Amino acid sequence: MVLSFKNSSIFNYNKNITEKLFHPEHLYQISNTTYTIHKDVASSTHVPRFTVGEGSRVLVNKNSRGSRLVNGEICTVRNIKSIDNRVISLDVTLDSTQETQELEPIKSELVLGSDTHSWKVEYQIQPAYALTYHKSEGQTLDDVFLDVEKHLQPAMFYVGASRVRCSDHLFVLNFNAADSISADPYALEEYKRLRVSIGLPPLPI
């Protein structure tokens, strides 16, 4: 899995990886759909979010009532049904239990009035080939690719690096030592103080 700090980078990684793994004919749109009934006239609007195929890796980003799907669960997509290439139902297999179940979309009311009724239907998942450092917290992964940017906080690097089971499967992308590694000024001053306290020059000559 790729871990990055920026949502824009995550979007691009997931899009590019998905397009590498699946033929376009085998990809289907996950969309947010808004339904409106106004004076007995029905309409719907579909806003595409991302594409999935049979076997796509996704992350659940909201608890699902009446099921074992919880926020942060990583799953594999199964049994896609679609209309006009838009997903209308799908199943997911949970990594944690290998159980397969239907993923129910979430319905939320938007407008209720005397002559207008509107609601949104959306699948609470996102692609899981790449995640932000924050989203990865709590995960234990076989392979981790860290997208390292300038001045990445040490705590964030630790969050990403500690996700992987074995350090041999930790890889750093876009690494530039001049940009990516900097000494904490407080730690540097303490290092100098300790050297002086034992009769050494502040820094190695």
Image (cartoon, rainbow, N blue to C red):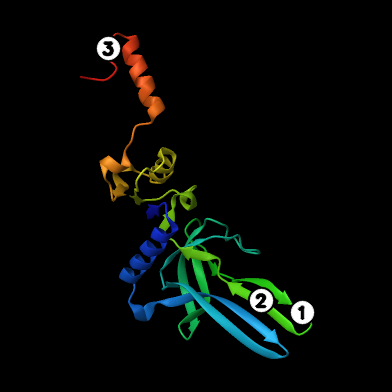
Mark 3 and mark 1 in contact? Answer it, CB < 8 Å. Answer: no
Give the vertical position of 65 relative to 159 (above or below).
below
What's the residue at 43%, 72% (across, down)?
A: 52
The x and y percentages for residue 41 are 68, 91
Sequence-first tag of 3 and 1: 1
Identify the image quadrant of the N terminus.
bottom left
Cα gap from disc 3 to disc 1, whole angstroms: 79 Å
The x and y percentages for residue 113 are 77, 79
Discs 2/1, front: 1
Mark 2 and mark 1 in contact? Answer it, CB < 8 Å. Answer: no
Q: Residues within 10 Å of mark 3 (few under 14, many from 20)?
A: few
Cα gap from disc 2 to disc 1, whole angstroms: 12 Å
How many labels sit on residues? 3
> Secondary structure under badge 3?
loop
Q: Which residue is mark 2?
A: 119
Discs 2/3, front: 3
Sequence-first tag of 2 and 3: 2
Give the vertical position of 137 relative to 17 (above or below).
above
The x and y percentages for residue 123 are 55, 70
- Snapshot quadrant of residue 44: bottom right
- Snapshot quadrant of residue 194: top left
Q: Which residue is mark 1?
A: 113
Mark 2: amino acid:
Trp
Which residue sits furthest left? 205
Mark 1: amino acid:
Gly
Residue sitting nearer the eye, 199 or 169: 199
Residue sitting nearer the eye, 175 or 52: 175
Q: Residues within 10 Å of mark 1 (few under 14, many from 20)?
A: few
Which residue sits furthest top? 199
Residue sitting nearer the eye, 49 or 185: 185
Mark 3: amino acid:
Leu
On residue 200, which mark appears?
A: 3
